[in-house]
Image (cartoon, grey):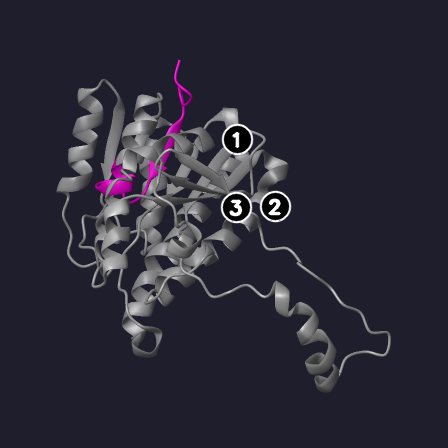
Amino acid sequence: MGLLDGKVVAITGAGRGIGRSLALECAAQGASVVVNDFGGSLTGEGTDDGPAQSVVSEIKTEGGRAIANVASVADPQGAQSIVDDALSSFGRIDGVVNNAGVSRDGMFHKMSLENWRAVVDVHLNGSFYLSRAAAPHFREQESGAFVFLTSTSGLVGNVGQSNYSAAKMALVGLSNSIALDMRRYGVRSNCVAPFAWSRMTESIPADTPEAKERVERLKSMTADKVAPMVGFLCSDAASEVSGQIFCVRKNEIFLFNPSRPVRSFHRSEGWTGDTIVSDFLPAIRPNLFPLQVSADVFSWDPV
């Protein structure tokens, strides 16, 4: 018996990299899988049916059930077609894994509107379109699981990824809202931040010794290490887990804390600009978080 026997799971961006590993894992755990991938380049250009069809063939070779969908999640009708294909082929939908993404890195002061919109349209809007399309079915059957692939680029920070970081952090808010709004219907939503070598991480600049060392560490973190956590979150075994943020780094799994107050200060007479400078700022200075990138927080070699 697999964790996902009898389930139907739709996975976006499942033709390559992390998405492919997620699709293979869910199928191995017994799920029927909708393998969505429009086959575009890392920057979201072009189309190719091959990657999605290839993963479907892999799953069927192992005795699993899968269909390909080559729509773009950035198109609301394309996102709807993923749910429609799940229903027409397998009769239901139980899990949605929002993994699809594109990368158009650049320093913020050079970020073009085109590159901003392209990344937000796929990561954030695409995740909304697909999740919204699945939500009525989850509500009606009083069960279902959403998984959003976020990133430490948003949770912690990275240089040159303002569009990507903003979209990935927005997914945390979206997931939490879904978890709150739909818990009465037995629907869950969680986030996973993966560390894995893929087309996304291949774009990381490696022009310093430190950056090159970081890239070598990333290469040791394969996509298949992320898959079991996502499969678990789609299963009934995770029925008590919702509104959470996890991170998978090779053989490590982390639970992230949500944003909560760190310290508070009260003045019965209220605050002025001067008293904020004289009283509040010195008091909170030891608690201010330093600007960091994810490599600063995860500074040790993956284990």
Q: Which residue is mark 2?
A: 180
The answer to which quarter of the image holds residue 287 is bottom right
Spot occupied by residue 24 in the image (x, y as percentages of width and height): 27, 29
Q: Main secondary structure of the magenta part?
A: loop
Crowding at mark 3 (Cα within 10 Å: few <14, some 14-19, many 20+): some
Numbered badge on residue 256: 3
Per the image, the residue denoted by label 1 is 141
Taking 55 as reference, is 146 left or right? right
Above/below status of 32 relative to 185: above
Vertical order, 257 against 103 (above or below) = above
Q: Is residue 182 left or right of residue 84?
A: right
- Magenta segment range? 1-20
Q: Nearer the viewer, mark 2 or mark 3?
A: 3
Q: Is residue 18 magenta?
A: yes
Left or right position of 18 against 246: left
Q: Residue at the location (22% across, 40% down)?
A: 15
Residue at the (25%, 40%) spot, across then down:
220
Vertically, is 178 above or below 28? below
Near mark 1 (Cα within 10 A), the count class, few <14, some 14-19 or many ≥20, is: some
Looking at the image, which is closer to me, 159 or 125?
Answer: 159
The dot on residue 42 is: none
Q: Is residue 231 above or below residue 114?
A: above
Residue situated furthest right in the rendering: 268
Q: How far apart are labels 2 and 3 at the CA level?
A: 18 Å
Label 1 close to label 2 by CB (< 8 Å): no
